[in-house]
Structures are given as C-alpha cells and as structure tokens.
Image (spheres, rainbow, N blue to C red):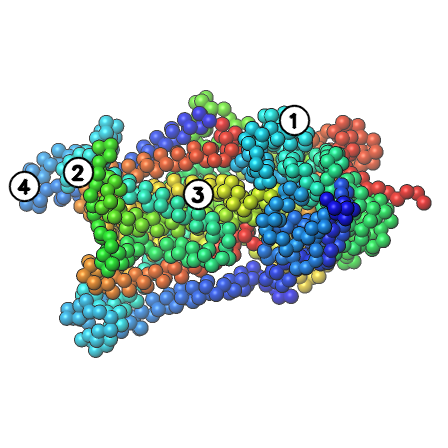
Amino acid sequence: MSDSAKTAPLLEVRDLATHFHTRAGIVKAVDGVSFSLKRGEVMGLVGESGSGKSITGFSIIGLIDPPGKIESGSIRLEGRELIGLPSRDLRAIRGKAISMVFQDPLMTLNPVLTIGAQILLALEAHEKVSAEEGRRRAIAALAQVRIPEPETKVDFYPHQFSGGMRQRVAIAIALLHRPKLIICDEPTTALDVSIQAEILAEMKELVAELGTALIWISHDLATVASIASRVCVMRYGKIVETGPVLDVLTRPQHPYTQSLLDSLPSRAKPGTFLARGGGVPDASPPARMSGASPSRGSKSDASYFVIQDVSKLFQTPPGILRLLGQKLGLSQPSRGVQAVDSVSLTVPRGEALGLVGESGSGKSTLGRMAAGIYAPNSGTVRLEGEPVMGGGERPHKNTTRIQTIFQDPFASLNPRMSIGDSIAEGPIAHGIVTRAGAAEYVRQWLAAVGLDPAFASRYPHQFSGGQRQRVAIARALAMQPDVVVCDEPVASLDVSIQAQIINLLMRLRSELNLTLIFISHDLSVVRHLCDRVAIMYRGRIVEEGPAGQIYDNPRHDYTRRLLAAVPVLPTAPPA
Amino acid sequence: MKQASPLARFWNEFRESKVALAALVVVVLMIGVALLAPWIAPQNPYDLANLALSDARRPPGYVGSGGFTHLLGTDAQGRDLFSAILYGLRISLQMGLIAGSLAFTLGVTLGITAAYLGGRWEAFIMRIIDLQLAFPAILLALVISAVLGQGKFQLIAALAAAQYAYFARTAHGAAAAERGKDYVEAAFSTPLPARRVVWRHILPNCLPPLIVVATVQVANAIALEATLSFLGVGLPVTEPSLGMLISNGFQYMMSGRYWISIYPGVALIILIVAINLVGDQIREQVNPRLRR
Amino acid sequence: MLGHILGRIVQALLVMLVMSALVFVGVYAIGNPIDVLIGPDVSQEMRLETIARYGLDRPLWEQFFTFLGRVLHGDFGRSFVFGMPVLDLILSRLPATLELTLAAVFGAALIGVPAGIYAGYKPDSLLAKIIMAISILGFSVPTFWIGLVLIITFAVELQWLPAGGRGETASLFGVEWSFLTLNGLSHLLLPALNLAFFKLALMTRLARAGTREVMLTDTVKFARAAGLSEWTVLRRHVLRLIAIPIVTVFGLEFASTLAFAVVTETIFSWPGIGKLIIDSITSLDRPVMVAYLMLVAFVFITINFLVDLTYVALDPRLRKARA
C-alpha cells in the first residue's frame, strides 16, 4: 500500500447523484452528496423517509436497481473509483471490502436454507473453502456475534431464530470477510427496544475490535447518537448538516436539524404541545349531537371504563377430521397462543392511559378487545356498566361510544372509497347525521383535523401518511365516541409528522373531553401524552401507575430493563 | 390535482400498454362482429335453402352459386366459411360469457361466504373446493356433459361446474386477506352491520384478482367448449360453435383442404389470445408485489 | 410428523370412498347400457335375463356395494364393449398414456422452468419477451388445435414425422414401450410436444412470476450485498425459493395431463386410456368409465399426498408446524 493510500480517507463520496426514472418523472433520491470516512470511523446517516439516506448506502455498495441509476459523482474506496467499475469487479468488493446489513432480518435470510449453508455461500463468494473449513468458520462467525451454542445453531433454519438472533446472523455474514466498511440500513428499526440496545452495544464493540468503519443509517437520532462519532443529517437527497454527534445534537446549525430535535417528545415537557408540531387547526369539530351519548356527566367516576379479567387465546379452528380425532381421544387440541392472560384495567372518565409493551406482549390484542373488535375468551369490557360486546354465537360490538385509530394509515382506510365516504359511512349508518347533512359534517371534521375540506372527494392514495392518519382520526371521532383506543397511531410516521399528530390528538382530547387508551412501544410518546401508564409483558400487566411514577421510580424489573434500554439523546452541557 | 378515482387511475395505466390496448380493441371488435353476425355475414349458413352441394369444400376466393366470393372458402356442406365463423363466434362467445358469469356468481358467493363465516364452515367449504380443484376441469366437464347429455344448457352447466371452484378459491383468498386488514376492522369497530361490511368494503377490494381470474376463465370456457365440441360431447350440431367447425374440417385436413379447419381455429385463437393479453395486463397492474 | 401422514392417509381413503360413490352414481345416470349390450331385435326374455346377469335390476345402493366389494378384490367388472376384464383393459392401455404424459410433463418442466427464470430475471430483454409471447400462445391456443397444426406441418406437409399410432415398441419389465425404439420415439415426439405445449407455457409463467417476485426481495439483495455471483443467487436462492409453487403445480399438472391426454390421444390415435375413455363415453361402456375415473381419482390423491410430503422437504418452516 502506498503512503498516499494510507493517509487517504477510507471512503470518499463526492457529489453523488442517484436518480430514479419513474413514470411520474425523475426522482432525485440522492442529489449531490459528499462526505468522507476514515478507517474505523463510525458515522451516522440520519434523515426522515424519502431523504435519500438508504439510497446513498445502496449507491456505495453498487446495488441500485433500475429504474434507479447513479447519474454522476464519485465514490472512492481507498482511492479506487467504484462508479463505473465492471460488475465483476464490483462483486469482488461487495461482501469483501464493503458489506451491508438490512432493516428487516425476517426478510433478508433465505427461509429454506440453513444458517450454515447461507454463511458458506457468502464464504465461497470470495474464497475457496472446503466443507469442514466452511462449517468451522461459520461456527466461529456465529460465536463472534454472541450466538449461544453455535455448533448446533449452525444447522438451524432462520425461522428457528428470534428477530434479534436473525439480525445477529446477518451481521455475522456481513463481518465474514473482515470488511473495511459495513453499511447498516436501519438495522434495529424492526426490533424491540431491548434487543435494539443489545445489538447496538455489540455492534459498537465489534467494529472497534475489528477496526471496521461503519455507516449507521437511521431515522432515529438517539440510536445514532449512541453509536456514531460523527453524523450527517440528510433531507431531500442532500446533506444539510454534518459534524461530531455531540455538536450536531446539542448545537444544531441547520434549522432542519433543530426542527427534528424539537419534534421529539422526549425533549419536551409532558403534556405540552410540541414546539415544531405545528399544524394544529383552528377549526373546532362539529358540535356533539344531543342524545349521541345517554349519560354524559362531568364528574369523574372511577368505574367509568372497566376491563375485567379479560383473556384472549388465539387458536386455529380444528378441521373436521381432527375434531373427530379429539372426540375419539386420538388427538390433542392444539395449544394456541395466550395473547392476553386475565388482565383487568379501570380507566376513569377523561383519562389518558398508556399501554406499553414490546412486540408480542399482547397490548394490541388487549386494545382490540377494549375497542370491541375482538371478543375476549373470558372476562368483560364495560363502559358505564354497559358491555361493549353483545353475547351469543357470533359476538358483535353493540356500542358506537368506543372508536379506534389504527397504526397503519395506509391499511386502515378503504382504498376504494373516497375519504368523505369513509368518514360519513358510520355516522350515517348510526343516525348521527342525516344523509343530506353528511357532506357538511364531513367538511367540518376535515377542517377540525387540519385538512382542506375540499379533499372529501379524494381517495386515500392521494394523501401522505400523516394526512391519512388525520383522516383516520376524523373517521373515528366523527362517530362521536367517548372512548378512543389508539393503537400505535404515530409509529409509522416520521418524527416531524409524528409531532403534528401528537399535537392534534392532545388538542382534540381536551376539546372533546375524550377518554384515551394509547397503545405504543415508544416510551417517550406515551410519557408525553398519558396520565397513567400500564406496562405489559407476555400477556399480563406487570406494573401500572401514574406516568411520572413509572418513569422516575419503576418498581418492576421488566419496567426498569425497558427504560434502561431506550437510547437517550445527549443534552446540551450547561452553559 | 385531478380527482382520480381508482378506476380512472387503472384505466390510465392500462392505456400505456400498447399490446393490451390493441388486444382490448380486438376483443371488443370480435364481440361486436359476433353480435352483428346476422347483418354482416354474406349468407345465413344454417338456412339450408342457401346451400348447394356443388359449392362444398371450395378453397378461399371461390365464387359460388350464391354469386358472392367465399373469402375463406366453403365447408363440406357448401357453407360459406366466413359466415359460419361469424355465427360460430357468436355461439362460442355466448357460451364462454354465460358459463363464465355463472361460475363467477356461484364461486364468488361461496368463497366470500366461507371467508365471512370463518371457522369450521370455512374449512369445510374450502376443503371441498380444493378437492374439486385437484380434479382437472376438462375431465369434470367431460363427465358432466356425458351425464347430462348434449345440449346448450347442459354444456353451460358442465362448464360452470368445472370452473366455479377457481373463482371460489380466488374470492376466498382475497376476502380472507382483506378480512385481516385494518380498514375492515375499522368498519367492524364502527360498528357497521356485517352484511354492509362485506358488500361495501370486502367485495370491492376483492374484485381486482377476481377480474383477472374472470378474463382467464372466460377464455378457458371458450377453449373448453371448443375442445368438448371437438371431442363430440359438446354442443348439438344445430349450434355449431367454432370448436365444432374445426372438428368438422378435421377429416378433410389430410387431403389438403386445410381451410375448413384452420380458419375457424385462427378466429378462435385470436379471440382467446386477445382475452388473455387483456387479462395479463390487468394482472400486472393489480399485483401489489410488483408495483414500484 | 407420523401422525400427520396417518391423518392424510385416512383422509385420502375417505376421499376415495366419496369419489367412488360420486362416480358410480354419476355414471349410472348415463343412458341405458342394455341397449349397448344387446341388439334391439332380441326377445324380451333375453333382455330381462341380461339385465339380471349384470345386476342391473337391483337397487342402486345394492349395486354400489356389490361393486365396492368387487373393487376391493381388484375386480372392476367386464367391459360391455370389449368383453374383457376392465382392469386388464386399462392396464394394457396405461403404459402408452404414462409414457406420453411423462415425456410431456418432464419436457415442459425442463424447458419451461429455465426459460421462465430467465424471463423473470431479465423481464425487459428481447428474449424474455419472445419467451412470454410463446407462452401466452401456449396458454391460449387449445390443445386440439395445436395438434392439428402439428399434424399438418410435420406429418402432411413436411412428412418428417408420423401422424398417429405408437409405432414400434420394445419390451421392458414385461410392458411394451415406444420410447425404447427409434421408430417409437418418432411417433412419440409429436403427441408429446402437443401435450407439453400448455404445460410449458404454464411452467414458464409460473417460474417467471416467482422469479420476478423473489428478485425484488431483501433475500436476494442481501445475497448480492454479500458478493454472491448472479449465477449463485439464481441457482441457490431463487431456484430454491420458487421451487415450492412449481413442485405443487408440477404434481397437479402431471395428473391433469393424464386427463388432457384424452384430446391428444384422440387426434394422434394414440392407443392410451384417454382414447379408451372417449370411446367408452360414446358407447356407454359403464364399467370402463367407472374404473377410469376411479383410477384418475386415485392418481390425483396419491400425487396430492406426495406433493404434500415434498412441501415439508422443501420448506423447513413446515416441519415443526406439522410435526
């Protein structure tokens, strides 16, 4: 290696432009990005969706598929230009000098090959290895990423691993040839917060140990802050700010970085409007119909909304033969999954209760039972003494006083109905408005959630994610409910949009005196919005109490672990 | 911004494929020609008064006793082949569309009902559908038409019985997928009556894959009818579809009188290929996994 | 796993029983076989005597159970037309259909799957478009018409290949096969091609659709990011991932090809069971129809069962779930 190659940066990206030639026109996903990376340096690449951060990563490793194309610029690895290299030379670099880890470990590993076989394929891509040698190295690679019992696990298939373990396998494959650079594209976004904390810590150790440089691509400023030494903030295909992590996060120079930070609920006082949330509409929701709710008092009574001993067991219905087998005692009934295990909760009128847990904790199932979507196997849900679900063979919800806002605004709106029809359908069916008055009613609700009332005739595909979530909120509230169950309503939104929706929910809640059950995996959002918090773990509530008490003085072990796992942003040192 | 409904958006995208557009034009044209056959055809090929045996088996271009040119020649009975094809097209399309819609209605009702009922009934209905799907349609149609005997309605019944299962499975698959989606849960949590949710929410969203299957199945029904008629278990001689025209010409093929069999075949193939090309484009457009 | 297999076997037997009842009732409804058995000029006594001899005067359910009892002993009765035991008749015709079907299905898979993978791998290339154009033709054009065109072209006009029959056969395991002689092969080629055309189109389309979807997945992207060559990605990842639907269809199509052989055998005068069934439908030869349909049902159920087992071999995710 020459002297100049030694002193030159490991990676130098200059004026990179990657465009997508779509039917709608040219999308400049990456539009003039420049940065350089030293050996062993860990750099964060932060931005909201559509900022071009992932495309930058894929451009570096040379995996841009049509209709995408690297238009211009230069990417130099140890002084060697990568753009324009023949595909064979690029392939020799991929996995060897530069490797990559993807977001969703469920999708990246091949489900029909053993872990060992997949590692062997990656080994053989760059060197000749015998079967035993390959197996030995595969076991060593698994051991390196802290997978217990690698000698047996090497013969496992991906589905036999948990999400975190699968992501470790992907990392093991990426590290196989001791690359000079690893690009991690949102590697912990699909994982629970406690697994994320483990992976972050291990990744940090591994790259330090191996001297590998790392580009950590994420939408989450906090994870970047906990692993990177330098950060680039991207927006609209350009880098708007770059610098040491501490400087950028404590003294942001660019207004966009500042607004990103201001959007985070963790940096605001709980219960206040988020500074950059903006977008809170001036219009008030239409007046409540008289008679829509029979007993609306102002006094807060403790037994307002009561969930008592509810359990939910998910079981596939047995086929006719199996049923016969069970009757004859030949086969056992299938076990099924106990999603919720006798949970009781009481929510007083006007309270916002946060329901927190990791994936599989049963929080969504509990929320759906509270909302009258799923019938519990046992136990009851009552609102002011009235059961939410009717009984019988096919239990059906029998009240309109509880409504739901779902996580994915792309899935929760019928793509074939105009949003006006979606909002008006329920109120018309239940006589809250007349068919003639529906148009005006819809317009008032659209204004109340901060959308142009003229949008009523548009279809969901014409809206952004944040706008759709506003529509979904309007649809739920147009039913004039007393209780609203929000199932991760901001989880799929970018932070700035998330701030807007949080502000909107807070305003509507106080204006309509709503009782809220707010389900989330995000502890900071829950702390910001909720008066009381219940922590769920494996189908049970392990701890419940006022928000301040849970966050500042957790009693249960699991709550403590959960809180400790959340990455925190560095705060400005006192001036 | 245009208030593009999903349908308008679909049509705009469809128009971009020149091949599919041309195929659609061909399909529409052939339906039109079939509808207007009595007015366009130079001769009513089934009015025996028009036929002269001296005109039999004449090659294309022959000017017969009727005083007009037989563009595509004549068949063994001295019919003008062009006219016979127009009338045959009419019958083939009729069979395909009637059998197709019957199968569609029956299958979709069953599939959606199964998805709606859920649980044991769903498993039972779909098990039977799967069982039937495992049995080849042609054999089923063959046996049913053999059991019911020859005739238009018998054949329609046989074709529909052989094909409804495809619709049932597609409808069930789509409805089961839609059933799990948030917007259906949102509708149920409003709460709207179940019937309304099925009609207004689930069914419209199941339509795209069903339309794809419908195009393919109409084409299949036409081909299947032709095959059965060719094998001699299809329509009676009084209802000569394209398949029967081909079958009638088969015996003259070895002696080089290819046109009696080949031209009806060409008409049949143009029709089926065009329908399938339209179906293919729709399939491309509704497959969410290939969208960028 | 063993419980699962046992369950499937019980299920298969039940299905077989239901099928045999359906087939029996269905076929019973067709015409009056007596008219086939004896001429119209025989005396009334002779007529009644024949009816009694074939058990046709008994109630339907009794006939069915007599039939079931005989079937369990391998006795499907005698053909009304050929006057020989149905089982022997079908077994003598089966090898012809079997070799035709196998040649068609394997030919279709061996050509169709690679062509489809290519068309899915490079969907915008000219060759891919040609492959798809051929496949849409194969998908659309009715089998019988392709048969006619093949005969005109290769037998009548070019006179390269024979238009019908099995040609010379040679014996293997005591059965006569066409594919063992050159002459037999030349007779086999056109009908096999005819029968394969639709399957070829189907396999191509299936492989293409699967490949296109798999190529867009993160699994492929991740493999590429690890530096695997395109060939390795196609061979080790894509082929394995698209194998499951292809094996399913391959199995089902094998059985439906048996049924479709009806058409091809009629056109090419191939003396297999397909031709036999058409002849027996037109001549109302009930025992042959019943035996044929039960044979097809049996083949179907067996193949479904094998496909199910192959799933488990191909998809490790099912092993635990079904254990």
Q: Quadrant of the N terminus of chain B?
A: bottom right
Q: Residue furthest front?
A: A2
Residue behind mark 2: C79
Asked if residue A529 shows in the view, the reply is no
Separation of residues labelled 1 and 4 (CA atoms): 89 Å
* Badge number at residue C246: 3
Where does the image place residue A166, in percent across and percent down from the top left?
Answer: 63, 35
Amino acid type of disc 3? Answer: Ile
* Badge number at residue B206: none
Q: Quadrant of the C terminus of chain B?
A: bottom right
Residue B143: quarter of image = top left
Asked if residue C130 shows in the view, the reply is yes
Q: Nearer the viewer, mark 2 or mark 3?
A: 3
Residue located 41% across and 36% down the image: C307
Where does the image place residue A470, in percent across and percent down from the top left?
Answer: 70, 53
Chain letter of disc 2 in the image = C
Residue located 21% across and 78% down the image: B67
Amino acid type of disc 4? Answer: Ser
Chain letter of disc 1 in the image = A
Q: Are marks 2 and 3 on the same chain?
A: yes
Label 3 or label 4, whichever comes before in sequence order: 4
Amino acid type of disc 1? Answer: Pro
Residue behind mark 1: A148
Separation of residues labelled 3 and 1 (CA atoms): 37 Å
Q: Label 2 near label 1: C-beta < 8 Å?
A: no
Separation of residues labelled 1 and 2 (CA atoms): 69 Å
Where does the image place residue B119, in percent across and percent down from the top left?
Answer: 49, 37
Q: Nearer the viewer, mark 1 or mark 4?
A: 1
* Tag 1 secondary structure: loop
Amino acid type of disc 2? Answer: Ser
